[in-house]
Image (tube, grey):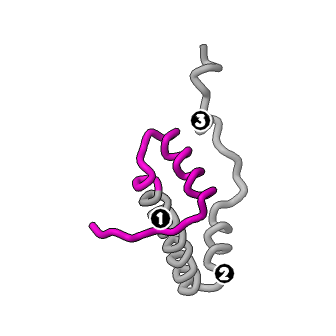
Amino acid sequence: MSNYALRLPESLKQAAKRIAAADDTTMNQFFVVAIAEKISAMETADFFSKRAALATPGAAQTAWDKVGTQSALPADSWVSQASSK
């Protein structure tokens, strides 16, 4: 574990403090989770960009073409618990 001195505007600090308290957590944990979420979002976007670059042109359309246009079979329908009572 390491430490990092963080400088932030007072308004941002107060908002983080309020949200952390509402979530019954510390500001430190709030910041750790927020940073982890941002890293995850950026790395996910990077992952899909790299995957898209490797894709065969037209592959997605070829896959969708295999789905077809046949409607769902009656046995495939779902009945909610509320409507079955």
Assign the N terminus to one quadrant of the image: bottom left
Q: Is 56 in the magenta?
A: no
Residue 11 quadrant: bottom right
Q: Which mark is residue 27?
A: none
Which residue, as the protein is rendered here, is positioned at the far front? 10
Q: Secondary structure at mark 2?
A: loop
Callout 2–callout 3 Cβ contact below 8 Å = no
**Which residue in the structure is indicated by mark 1?**
35
Q: Nearer the viewer, mark 2 or mark 1?
A: 1
| Mark 2 → mark 3, Cα distance in angstroms | 33 Å
Looking at the image, which residue is at 68% across and 60% down? 68
Residue interval drawn in magenta: 1-30
Which is nearer the N-term, disc 3 or disc 1? 1
Q: Is residue 7 above or below residue 24?
A: below
Assign the C terminus to one quadrant of the image: top right
Q: Is residue 24 left or right of residue 64?
A: left
The residue nearer to you, when weighing 49 against 58, is 49
Q: Secondary structure at mark 1?
A: helix
**Which residue in the structure is indicated by mark 3?**
75
The residue nearer to you, when weighing 8 against 36, is 8
Q: Residues within 10 Å of mark 2 (few under 14, many from 20)?
A: few
Residue 59 quadrant: bottom right
